[in-house]
Amino acid sequence: MTASTRSSARILRMSQLFVRTLREDPVDAEVPSHRLLVRAGYIRRAAPGIYTWLPLGLRVLRNIEAIVREEMDGIGAQELSFPALLPREPYEATGRWTEYGANLFRLQDRKGNDYLLGPTHEEMFTLVVKDLYSSYKDLPLSIYQIQTKYRDEARPRAGLLRGREFVMKDSYSFDIDDAGLEQSYQQHRDAYVRIFDRLGFEYVVVKATSGAMGGSRSEEFLAKAAVGEDTYVSCTTCDYAANVEAVEVRAPAPVPYDDAPAAHAEQTPATPTIETLVDHLNAEHPRGDRSWTAGDTLKNVLVQLRHPSGEREALAIGVPGDREVDLKRLEGQLEPIEVEPMDEATLREHPALVKGYIGPGVLGEESASGIRYLVDPRVAEGTRWVTGADVDGSHVLDLVVGRDFAPDGTIEAADVRSGDSCPRCDDGVLEPARGIEMGHIFQLGRKYAEALDLQVLDENGKLVTVTMGSYGIGCSRAVAAVAEGTLDDIGLCWPRHIAPADVHLVAAGKDESILAAAERIAHELAGAGIEVLYDDRVGKVSPGVKFKDAELIGVPTIVVVGRGLAESGEVEVKDRASGEKTAVAADHVVSHLVDLVRR
Amino acid sequence: MTASTRSSARILRMSQLFVRTLREDPVDAEVPSHRLLVRAGYIRRAAPGIYTWLPLGLRVLRNIEAIVREEMDGIGAQELSFPALLPREPYEATGRWTEYGANLFRLQDRKGNDYLLGPTHEEMFTLVVKDLYSSYKDLPLSIYQIQTKYRDEARPRAGLLRGREFVMKDSYSFDIDDAGLEQSYQQHRDAYVRIFDRLGFEYVVVKATSGAMGGSRSEEFLAKAAVGEDTYVSCTTCDYAANVEAVEVRAPAPVPYDDAPAAHAEQTPATPTIETLVDHLNAEHPRGDRSWTAGDTLKNVLVQLRHPSGEREALAIGVPGDREVDLKRLEGQLEPIEVEPMDEATLREHPALVKGYIGPGVLGEESASGIRYLVDPRVAEGTRWVTGADVDGSHVLDLVVGRDFAPDGTIEAADVRSGDSCPRCDDGVLEPARGIEMGHIFQLGRKYAEALDLQVLDENGKLVTVTMGSYGIGCSRAVAAVAEGTLDDIGLCWPRHIAPADVHLVAAGKDESILAAAERIAHELAGAGIEVLYDDRVGKVSPGVKFKDAELIGVPTIVVVGRGLAESGEVEVKDRASGEKTAVAADHVVSHLVDLVRR
C-alpha cells in the first residue's frame, strides 16, 4: 500500500515547535536568504559551510526533494542510494582522486586505506551498472539518488548557497549510442523544466561548460538572483543564453594581409599601460579616418596555473586592449586547474618578460620564455595589432597574426560585456545577469565508461562502450535559492508547493472564544489534509510578535483569528506575498482555505 | 497539502527494474540475510561494511524509516537533521573525540581543521537546544533525526548487520528533572514497542549497559537471531531479561569466618591448571562431605586493557575456578576501553607473576605487581578459596576474602551460563539466547548537558542543568535483522508492512491472453493503491525462473497468471510465507488482493 491512505495532516503548534525566531541578523550571514533562514529558525550553522536543518527547514527541503523525486520517477528513472564514504580506487581509475585537488575531503580508515567523501558519483553509478547489466537490451537506463554530498570549498559562503555538506539529486543515464544519449538528455531536460516550474521561482536555462566532468553538451538551470555567483548572458533578439564561462566569441573571418605594412618597433617612452599607449599613438600617428583606441592594441596578461597535482605553470593570454581577462571564465575553460594572477616575484623569474611591454615575441611554447600563449578568438589570422616590443619603452606596430607571430591556440578568457554581439544571431546583443546554479545536465559521453570498462553486448554480440549522461540538482541549495528569489523586506515568502505549511494560523488574543475558534479551525484544516502552523502561544507573546513571526516565517497564507470574531464573526485571510487581506466568515474559512490551497 | 492525495501506486516492471538476481551466494557473505539480500538484488557492497542500496533495498529501508518516523511523530518528537561531517570541538568537550578511539572516522579539511564523521549526535543535539531554548517552559522536548552515521568498526561483518556507514534514527529527550526524564524514557520505550511490533518479527527488550554513552537506566531491543552478536539471558520464571553484559550476579551475603583455619601454602607440584589442582586436592585432602571441585578454587586471569588514548594497562580478574572470564562481558563494563588476553611477552614483564600459580598476594594496586585486581561478586567477604601461592608448584588453601586479602573491587566478568540463578527472583534460572541489537534507549542524565553547559531557568529563575535521554534505532540494520528473522530456505520473506511491494505478479507464459490479463490486473491493482512488482519479462525468461525470482525476492503475496486462465478463468494467489495457494477467478482477483493487503 502507498502511505497515501493517511489523509489528515499534523498540526504544528508554535507553543511546541522547535524554533526560535531572531530579531537580529546573524553576524556571518552575507545574503538575505541566509539571514532570513537563520532568523526564521530554518537552519543553524554547525561549521563553515555545514548546516543543521531545524524542523521548518527540513520540511522545505523534503518538499523540494519530493517534487524532484516525482519528476524523476515520472521519466522512469529509478532511485537507489550510494554511500557517501567511498573507496579511493574508482576515483583513482578516472583520475578524479587527483583532479579534485583540495576540494575533495579525503580520509583513511583504521587500516590506513584511503577513502573520500563523495562530491559526485559518476564512478559508483558506472560500476553498479557494470555489475548488474551486460546487454544492449538492458538499456536505456536512468538511475538516481537524493543524497548528501561533500566538497571542501575554498570559500564556503552565503549559507546553503555554497556549502561543504549538501543534498543533491544526481542521476545518470546509460545508452548504447549517441542518439540514445540525446534522448535521455532531452528527457532529463524536460523533467528539469517541470521541476523548476513547480518550485515556483524565476530561472533560466543556459549553455554551460562541462568542467571537471568531461563530456560535450551541457546546460545549467540558473535561478535569477543578484547574489548569484554565476554570470550568464542572454541575447536581446534570439533565445541564446549562456553562462559567461561558456560564451564562445564569434571569431572574425581571416583578414587578408598582403597589403599590410611590415611590422616595425618604435620608441614609446613611458607607455606601460594601454591608456598611455593609445595617447602616444594618437599624438605620434594621427589617423585621418578614426582615432586609435584600446581595441587596436594587443594586451598580454600573465597568469599562474595550479594543476590539481600541485604543479604550477605560467600561461600568457592575449586579448584586445579594451578587454580584461576574466579569471573565472578562464578557469571555466581550464577546470580542474585553478588560476591566479602572476605575482611580481614569479614575473621576475622570467627575464625575457618586460613588464608593461610584453609582446608575442617572447611568448609561446617555442619562444625564449617557453610560456604557452593563447589568444582571444578576436586575435584572428590577419588582424593587425600594436603590442609590446619586449624592450622597456618600446612597442611594435602593424604586427599581423599569422604573418609575424603564431599563438599556441585560442581561449575564451576575455570578459563578456553588455552589448557584445550575440554569437548565434546576426543582430542581437548580449545582456549579462547573475544567477545561482540550481541544476546542471551533461552529456558525459564515454569518458567514465571507458575508464571503468563499462561495456555491453550489442545486437551483433559485439562489446560496445556505453555512453552516459549526468544530471544534478542541488536540493539544499534550492531551499536558499527559492528563498532568495521570493523573500521581501519583512521575511521569507515561500511558493505554495514547498512552503513548510499551507496555512499559518494566528490566535490573536487571549479570549477563550478566540482560542476555541482557532483550535477548531486548526483541527478542521488538519482533518482536510491542510498543513497548519498554528500559533497557539499564550502568555507573554503579543499579537504583534505573532504577526511578525508569521511574516518572517513566510507560509503563503496567514489566517488571523482576532477581535473580528466577536465583532462580525469573521477571521482575516492574508496572502503573505501580496499582503492582500480578505475577511471571511469563521464558519466558512475552512472550506475557503481548502479551495485556496487546492487551487 | 500532504502528499497523500496521490492514491495510485507505480507498477514496478521486472523488465525494467534495476535488479539482477544471482543463483550463487556472494563469497564474502557470512549470514543468510546477507547472502539473500545480495542474491535478490537489494544491496551491493561498495567497500568493507559500506553498502549501496539498489531500488528494492531502498524501498524496504524507506518503509522501515516511515514506520519509525510515524511513531516518533506520534509521541510528539520533532524531526530535524544534523550534518554527518562534524567539527571536533564539541566532541573534544565531552571527551568522546578521544574515547571513541579507532572507531571514529577523523579527517581534516583543507585548512587543517579537525572533523569527524558522526557516530552518534548527543553533542550536537545538546548544543542546538542550548542555542534555541532557555527556560523550563520550553521543556520537555524530544527531537530526532533519521540520518547516515559512521563507525570505523574493527570487524565490519554480516552485511548490514555491522556496517561502517549506516542509517540510524537517533532521538534525544530534554527534561528539567528526573521525573520528566523517566516519563520521556517511558514514552520512547512505548513508541519502540509499537515500532518493533509493526516491523513484524520476534524481539525481546533486555536490560543493557550504558557503555560509552554514560548515564544510568538503559535497555536494548534485540531481534531474536542465532546469528546475532549479542547474547542475552531471560529468566525461566520472572520477566527478567538482560544482555549478558548487563547481568549483575547476586553476591552472597558476607560469610562469617571466625572459625576458618588460617591460610597455609603447600606444595602442589605440577598443578598449573584448575583440573590438576582439583585432582591434587581430592587426592591429598579428601573431604568427607563432598569432593573438591573447580568452584572451590579462585582463578586469576590477566588481561590487557587498551584505553582510547592508546595507553595500555594490565588488569587481573579473580573468578571461581569453574567460570571463565567473558571478555565481551568484561568489555561491556569497561567501554570504551578495549580488552584482550595478556600475551606471554607481557606476562614476562611482571616477574612477580608465576604462570599457573598466580594468587592475590601479588595482585592489587598496592601489591608487588601494582596490577589492579577485581573479582567476581561471588568472591565475597568471608568466602574461602584455594588459589595460587605465587611460587611455582605451590597453592594456598583456606584463603579468606577480607581476612587474608582485599581485592580492589568487584566486576561482572565471569561468564553467564544456562541454569545460573536469576538475579531478580528466587527460583528462576537464566536461559541464554542470541540477538541482534535493533534499538537502544538510555537515560543519559546530565553528562552531556554538564559538559556542554546546557542550562535553563527553572520556575524560580535559577539556572538548572537539563537531564537527557538518548534513543537509537538502526534502520539499515533493521532491514537485515527483519530479513534474518523471516527468511526461509528459498529466499526472503518480508512482513507486509515493510515489503518492497504488496504483490508480486507473474505473467507465466507467452500467450497474448496471459500477458493482457496480467497487464490489466497490474493496472487495476496500481489504481487501487496496491504496489505491484510485475514480472512482465518475455523472451528467454521461463516461468520457472520467474517463480524462483519471486520466491527469492520475498514479496508476501505472489499472483501467477498462467495456464489456469484459459482452463478455468482462474489465477493463483500464493502466500509467500506459508506457501499456501488459492485459485481465484481472474475477474475477482483485484478485489481479493485489495482485501488481503488492507486486512
Image (spheres, coloured by chain):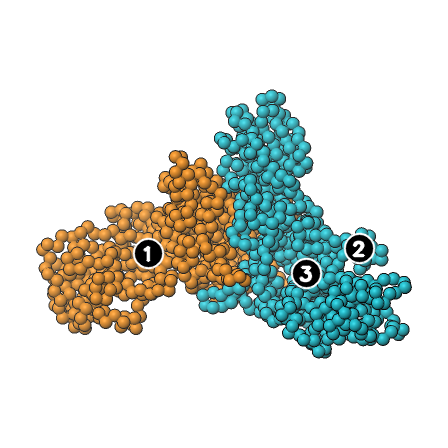
Chain colours: A orange, B cyan
Q: Is residue A55 visible?
A: no
Residue under pointer 3: B328
Residue under pointer 1: A333
Q: Are marks 1 and 2 on the same chain?
A: no
Residue B419 tag number: 2
Neighbours of disc 2 within 10 Å: few (<14), some (14-19), many (20+): few
Q: Nearer the viewer, residue B178 or B307?
A: B307
Neighbours of disc 3 within 10 Å: few (<14), some (14-19), many (20+): some
| Among the 4 quarters of the image, the one containing residue A313 | bottom left
| Among the 4 quarters of the image, the one containing residue B363 | bottom right
The amino acid type, in three-letter code, at marker 1 is Gln
Q: Nearer the viewer, mark 3 or mark 1?
A: 3
Distance in Å between CA atoms under marks 3 and 1: 58 Å
At a point 53% along the width and 45% down the height, the residue shown is B54
Q: Chain of mark 1?
A: A
Q: Nearer the viewer, mark 1 or mark 2?
A: 2
Q: Are marks 3 and 1 in contact (CB under 8 Å)?
A: no
| Among the 4 quarters of the image, the one containing residue B581 | top right
> Which circle's residue, 2 or 3, is located before the other in the chain?
3
Q: Nearer the viewer, residue B62 or B134?
A: B62
The amino acid type, in three-letter code, at marker 3 is Lys
Q: Chain of mark 2?
A: B
Q: Secondary structure at mark 2?
A: loop
